[in-house]
């Protein structure tokens, strides 16, 4: 058996030092989860090395998008980086659908969620991305036993602020925001000025994130049986 295919974790990029720390910690946690697999980091925006630069230095690799929905970066920037680096990398599936329980855990750890919740996501003009957040809100509602409305920080509607206001207008007194964000940064900071009574922390390096990345990687390479310690046939959602 040859050397396992390297894994490249593609993340958005942030100037937040706390966000960069989460990225580094996540890479190390995934490397521990997949012993023998080289785990690299490639930034889709803001920071370097860019994903294209990372891929150019590796060659064959599996990219796991560290994004919660299939927005522009996932559907356009990541495939473009693959082409620009020689086309030898393969793109894995999304990790977001596996992380709603982690969002619920962060929300409940922050305190009493109150009467209703806004699931706050980055936002996208892509209908699929908006639909994925709406579905995550439905699932979160079932986990926390409260009404949950999707809200967006950019592009899509309603905004997080408007979602909080709509829930108050409908008779809910105490509103919480559940962060559907992977790491601290500008977006997570904005949530504290959106009018809610409580804001949960971003998901961060949660065990479910590590498992979701490992599963997305395994779904691409399991036919070659080169994933140490990973059962085949999991995490098969691919990016259309």
Image (tube, rainbow, N blue to C red):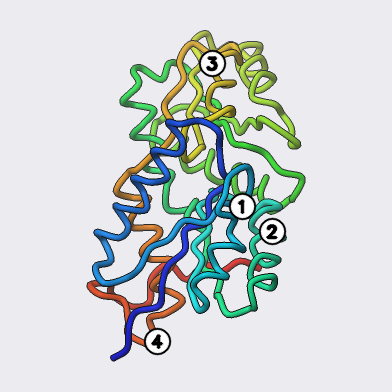
Q: Which residue is mark 2?
A: 77
Q: Which residue is mark 1?
A: 44
Q: Which mark is residue 192?
A: 3
Q: Earlier in the sequence, mark 4 or mark 1?
A: 1
* Marks 2 and 4 in Cβ contact (< 8 Å): no
Q: Can you name the residue that lies furthest to the bottom here?
A: 1
Instruction: Point out residue 210 in the picture as x, y percentages from the top left corner.
Output: 34, 54
Q: Earlier in the sequence, mark 2 or mark 1?
A: 1
Q: Which mark is residue 223?
A: 4
The reply, left or right, for residue 63 in relation to residue 108 is right
Instruction: Point out residue 194 in the picture as x, y percentages from the top left corner.
Output: 61, 15
* Marks 2 and 1 in Cβ contact (< 8 Å): yes
Q: Earlier in the sequence, mark 3 or mark 2?
A: 2
| Image point (34%, 43%), residue name | 205
Element type where label 2 sits in the image: helix
Q: Which image quarter: residue 76? A: bottom right
Report, in whole angstroms, how far the alpha carbon at label 1 lies from the one at label 3: 26 Å
Tell which tag, 4 or 1, sits nearer the viewer. 1
| Image point (38%, 63%), residue name | 39
Q: Nearer the viewer, residue 146 or 175?
A: 175
Q: Is residue 172 above or below residue 184?
A: above
Q: Residues within 10 Å of mark 2 (few under 14, many from 20)?
A: some
Q: Earlier in the sequence, mark 1 or mark 3?
A: 1
| Image point (28%, 66%), residue name | 34
Element type where label 4 sits in the image: helix
* Marks 1 and 3 in Cβ contact (< 8 Å): no
Q: Residues within 10 Å of mark 1 (few under 14, many from 20)?
A: many
Report, in whole angstroms, how far the alpha carbon at label 4 lies from the one at label 1: 28 Å
Q: Quadrant of the N terminus?
A: bottom left
Q: Which image quarter: residue 154? A: top right
Tell which tag, 1 or 3, sits nearer the viewer. 1
Report, in whole angstroms, how far the alpha carbon at label 3 lies from the one at label 2: 30 Å
């Amino acid at each position: 058996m040859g050397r396992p295919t390297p894994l490249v974790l593609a993340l958005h990029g942030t100037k937040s030092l706390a966000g960069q720390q989460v990225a580094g910690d996540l890479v190390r946690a995934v490397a521990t989860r997949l012993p023998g697999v080289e785990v690299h980091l490639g930034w889709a925006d803001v920071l370097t090395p860019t994903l294209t630069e990372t891929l150019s230095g590796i060659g064959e690799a599996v990219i796991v998008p560290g994004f919660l929905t299939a927005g522009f970066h996932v559907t356009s920037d990541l495939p473009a980086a693959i082409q620009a680096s020689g086309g030898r990398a393969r793109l894995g599936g999304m990790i977001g659908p596996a992380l709603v329980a982690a969002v619920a855990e962060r929300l409940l750890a922050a305190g009493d969620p109150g009467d209703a919740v806004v699931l706050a996501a980055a936002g996208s003009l892509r209908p699929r991305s908006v639909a994925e957040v709406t579905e995550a809100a439905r699932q979160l509602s079932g986990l926390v036993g409260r009404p949950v409305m999707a809200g967006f920080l950019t592009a899509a509607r309603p905004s997080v602020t408007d979602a909080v206001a709509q829930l108050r207008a409908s008779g809910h007194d105490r509103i919480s925001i559940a962060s559907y964000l992977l790491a601290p940064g500008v977006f997570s900071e904005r949530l504290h000025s959106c009018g809610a009574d409580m804001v949960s922390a971003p998901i961060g390096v949660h065990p479910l994130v590590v498992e979701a990345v490992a599963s997305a990687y395994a779904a691409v390479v399991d036919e070659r049986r080169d994933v140490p310690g990973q059962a085949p046939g999991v995490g098969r959602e691919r990016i259309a």
